[in-house]
Amino acid sequence: MDRTIGFIGLGHMGAAMAANLVKAGYPLRVYNRSPEKAQPLLALGARLAAKPHDVTPPDGVVITMVSDDAALELLATGPDGFAQSLGPGGLHLSMSTISPALSRRLAALHRDRGTFYLAAPVLGRPDAAAARTLWIIQAGSTEAKAIARPYLETLSQGIFDFGEDPGGANLVKLAGNVLLASALEAMAETLAFAEKNGIPRTAFAEMFGATLFPCPVYQNYGRAIASQVYEPAGFRLDLGLKDVTLALAAAAESRVPMRLASVVRDQLTSAAAKGRADMDWSALGLEASESAGL
C-alpha cells in the first residue's frame, strides 16, 4: 500500500516535483508557508495541511524541498514541526540543498525517534523537475533507501548513491554547485574578454559550446551569459551564494582550501549587494562585464 506523502516547500522546484507525485497517483498532502502556492496541486487532487506536523500520518513520508538550513530545521523541529508527528517507520526524505552538518543532526534526531532519514538532494532546474529528468544524490541507511526508491524514481532519471553518511550526499551536491558556479565565472570572464577585443559574444559562446565544452551547462548558460538574459531566474543568485558559502564552511571544517570557490563567493556577494539577488546566478556575467568596463 502506498504511504501518504507529505510535501513541504512549493517553490519552482518543489511545486514541479509535487505535481509529478500526485500525477503518479500517490496520496499527497502539501504544506507551504504561502498556502496560495498550493492551489494548482489541490486542483490535481492534493490536500492542504495547515501545519507542518499535519502533513503526514505517523507511518508516512515527508519530502522537504526548502531554501536553507534555518527553514528546514524550523519545519522539522520547531513548535509545529513534523518530526513530532512522524512515527516509527516513517521517513523524512530531505531533498533540499543544506549543510552536511544539519543533515547529520537531522539523521541523528530521526534515529533517536525510530524514524528514517534520507538525504537526497537533486541536480537540475525547474524545467528538469517538471520533465522528471532530475538526477538524485542519495545517502543514508539501506532501509531508508528502500522506502524512498519508488518516489525518487518517479521524480528523476537516475539515482547516484554515496553510502550511509547522509552528510555525504549534501557535500556532493554542494561540490556540484561549486563546479557550476566556477563554470559560470569562467564563462563570464572569457565572454567579457572576447567582447572587449571585438569578438561577438554569441559566436564565441556557440563555438566553445559545440567544441571544447559540448554539454548543457556550457551551452545553456553560455547562451544566457552571451545574450545577457538573467531574468527570470531558473536558480536565484542568492541561493547560489548560500550554497557556495555552505561549501566553504564544510571545506574549512575539513581543512580543504577552495580558492576558486572563494573567488566565486566574493563575486556572488558583490552581485547581491548591487540588488541582483533575485536574478539568475548567471548574472555573474554582469559582474565580469562591469569589471571590464563594458
Image: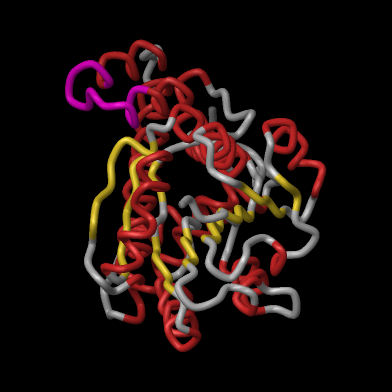
Q: Which residues are magenta?
A: 209-219
- Residues 145 and 100: in front is 145
Seen at 71% across and 54% down, the residue is 31
Nearer to me, 191 or 148: 148
Q: Is residue 24 left or right of residue 144?
A: right
| x and y percentages locating residue 66 in the rendered image | 60, 56
Question: Residue reaching furthest left?
Answer: 212
The image quarter in which residue 189 lies: top left
Q: Is residue 168 above or below residue 97?
A: below
Q: How is the image coloured?
A: secondary structure
Residue in view at x 47 percent, y 56 percent = 95
Picture coordinates of residue 70 (x, y %)?
63, 71
- Inspect this view and state whether residue 287 appears: no
**In the rendered view, would you say 185 is above or below 164?**
above
User: Residue 236, how many percent across, how many down?
Assistant: 59, 43
- Judge by depth and name the residue closer to the eye, 216 or 43: 43
Looking at the image, the residue that sits furthest to the front is: 1
